[in-house]
Image (spheres, rainbow, N blue to C red):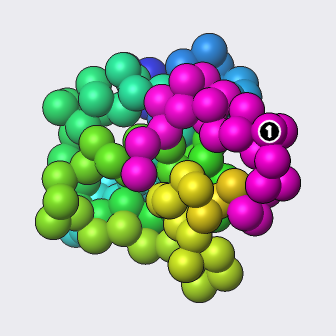
């Protein structure tokens, strides 16, 4: 697992394919409370990270699928903090489609892409 130190308690967690879309990088705060910021690393990378490092809470910087695609891998009791904006659609692909794509064939294709390329699951 590649962690890049940025400050005393802050690390960059490098996402699969160097964090290029449809992945993202994440940040890890290791302190009294250990926080992972964003879960779009790629599912294999996220699984490895969660097996190796303690995480007390997850913070999603925003609701785009490439930043929260791995939320479904978290234990059910894991707190997930997210911005109020988009709260009603956060983590729900069908509702996200209403925000980011049109409700026709293009929207269905967008949902298939997000599921397949990002591994997104509600």
**Residue 71: image x %, image y %?**
38, 50
Q: Helix, strand or loop at disc 1?
A: helix
Q: Residues within 10 Å of mark 1 (few under 14, many from 20)?
A: few
> Quick check: is 121 in the magenta stretch?
yes
Residue at the far top: name it: 17
User: Which residue, given by chain and number where applicable, does mark 1 sit on?
Assistant: 105
Specify whether 2 is left or right of 76: right
| Residue 23 in sight from this viewpoint | no
Q: Quadrant of the N terminus?
A: top left
Residue at figure coordinates x 18%, y 60% from the top left: 76
Instruction: Out of 122 and 70, give the one closest to the viewer.
Output: 122
Comparing 87 with 47, the one in front is: 87
Is residue 42 depicted above or below 40 in this figure?
Answer: above
Left or right? Give the position of 6 relative to 1.
Answer: right
Magenta residues?
Answer: 98-122
Occupied quadrant, residue 19 = top right
Q: Is residue 80 magenta?
A: no
Q: Position of residue 67 (x, y in %)?
A: 59, 48
Foreground: 76 or 13?
76
Where 5 falls versus 60 (above or below)?
above
| Chief SS of the magenta region | helix
Which residue is drawn at the image coordinates 41% and 51% (left, top)?
A: 122
Identify the residue at horizontal 48%, vertical 59% (top origin).
Answer: 91
Residue 101 image position (x, y, % from top left)? 81, 52
Residue reaching furthest bottom? Answer: 84
Left or right, residue 112 beside residue 31: right
Viewer-side residue, 106 vs 3: 106
Q: Taking the image as drawn, is residue 113 in sight?
A: yes
């Amino acid at each position: 697992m590649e962690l890049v130190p940025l400050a005393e308690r802050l690390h960059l967690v490098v996402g699969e394919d160097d964090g290029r879309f449809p992945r993202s990088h994440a940040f890890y705060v290791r302190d009294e409370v250990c926080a992972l910021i964003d879960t779009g690393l790629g599912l294999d990378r996220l699984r490895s990270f969660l097996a190796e490092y303690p995480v007390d809470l997850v913070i999603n910087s925003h609701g785009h699928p490439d930043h929260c695609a791995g939320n479904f891998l978290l234990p059910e009791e894991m707190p997930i903090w997210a911005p109020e904006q988009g709260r009603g659609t956060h983590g729900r692909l069908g509702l996200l489609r209403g925000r980011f794509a049109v409700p026709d064939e293009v929207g269905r294709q967008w949902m298939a892409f997000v599921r397949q390329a990002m591994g997104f699951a509600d």
